[in-house]
Image: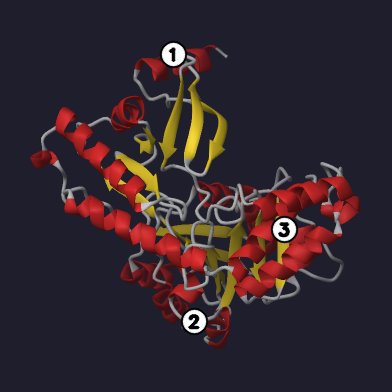
Amino acid sequence: MQVVKEYVQRWYESGLDPDEYICHGKQGNIFDVEEEETGVRRSVLSFCTNDVLGLVQEESVKQAAIDAILQYGTSNSSCSVLSGRIDLHRQLENEISDFKHLPHTQLFLNAWMAMQALMDAFCHLAIPVPGFKNTRETLILTDVLNHGCIISALANAGTRSGKMFGHSPRVRVKAYRHCDMQDFARKLKRYAQPDDRILVISDAVFSMDGDIAPLPEMIDILSNYPGSVLVMDEAHASGALGKTGRGIYEHFNILPQYAIERGVVPIIMTTFSKFGASVGAAISSHVSELKPLLNVSPTSIGTCSLSAPLAAGAMEALRTVKREPERVQKLQENAKYLRSRLMENDFVPIGETNVVPVLLPSDVNPKLFARILMHDYGIWVSPIWFIAKPRLRITANVLHTREEMDKLVAAMVAVREATYKPAAIISA
């Protein structure tokens, strides 16, 4: 442990450790937070929650979770494939399948497990079956800015999770430049072999850049490789993109059926921690045979199933989105307004969604910038300084008023004037 001790000491000395806060309660976007290091408590306006549709505190969602506890208890106490599957799981899977226009859905505890299960199921199948042998290698292409859950799953894609050694044919993973379809097509042409099983995976909305994957172009390119699989991670797209929040396909006015008709197999991962007022994830496909493999993957069979209150909360949130699509439209209006106000004041918000990253000059410490916003102006945003280029990561949600967004921008202007000159602002 000596190496760990020395490393963490140096980490703190270098100022890389995040400021940590404990929430004692919240009402809308007003949070009661405690600074863990000092114990100081403040009431702050939050621009860093992923509760994009404001459903975490919705009475019907809370009541659904309470009712589920009263019926099923707090835990299912087993994995889904043994004795941990409850009727709420089936209901939620059906709701997601309807929402995403893909008929077969499997639930998971979180996105990291869902992605690993998908790699296990697609690349390595499940268990040895008498008389069956797979001899085809797998080629996986991934956007260089994909989320960490994807990167982690791909790092282990060569060996089935839960086993020390893999027995499947080789898995080759190649990255392409961010949303660069010329490079994407080039990499496919360069690395695809005649008998490869091809899987391409991308965030729908990129969590640190707020931009959107070029889905139609990806389908066009993959149509030259019949049977190829296209995975969209819709963690930040569900509830945020499209007229009714159904995600990236609706954003581009197409359905997954369009990909199927072009010879491409669409797979969508949905998560519940943003629009769904819960936690958990789901993989949806039109291929019925994929679901049993996902169900017996090591991440499914070795883990307790999604608890009843989490499943019930997610399901009621999803039903609310279906009943009230105006929430999605309000979210999109808020994101557009906030972006316009930032640009009017010479900030550079990148991307195009409710995830609003604002790049900062390299000599400005985002952590210190965010700390001043909280301490002096009572505004909470997320500073990013060690996993991407220095930036503030702001998330707009449906509950923000224009007055609150104006307050944020005014505070950012004040902090900027106190810490560096406007001329130093970097260009896009």
Q: Residue at x 76, y 73 (%)?
A: 289
Q: Secondary structure at mark 3?
A: strand
- Residue 82 in the image: above or below residue 229: above
- How far is disc 1 from disc 3 in space, using C-alphas? 40 Å
Task: Give the residue type that dot 2 points to.
Answer: Ile
Q: Between label 1 and label 3, give the one nearer the viewer.
A: 3
- How far is disc 2 from disc 1 in space, using C-alphas? 52 Å
Of callouts 2 and 3, the N-terminal one: 3
Q: Residue at x 40, y 56 (%)?
A: 354
* Residue 326 x, y percent position in the rendering: 50, 68
Of callouts 2 and 1, the N-terminal one: 1
- Residue 57 in the image: above or below residue 282: above
* Residue 72 x, y percent position in the rendering: 87, 48
Residue furthest to the left in view is 423
The N terminus, quarter of image: top right
Q: Residue at x 54, y 52 (%)?
A: 54
Residue pointed to by mark 2 = 254
**Is 228 left, or right, of 12 in this rendering?**
right
Disc 2 to disc 3: CB gap under 8 Å = no
Task: Give the residue type that dot 3 points to.
Answer: Leu
The image quadrant of residue 290 is bottom right
- How far is disc 2 from disc 3 in space, using C-alphas? 25 Å
- The label shown at residue 9 is 1
Disc 1 to disc 3: CB gap under 8 Å = no
Q: Residue at x 44, y 63 (%)?
A: 330
Colouring of the image: secondary structure
* Residue 258 x, y percent position in the rendering: 53, 84
**Is 98 left, or right, of 339 in this rendering?**
right
Dot 2, how many residues are within 10 Å of its Cα: few (below 14), some (14-19), or many (20+)?
A: few
* Viewer-proximal residue among 90 and 130: 90
Residue pointed to by mark 3 = 107
Disc 2 to disc 1: CB gap under 8 Å = no
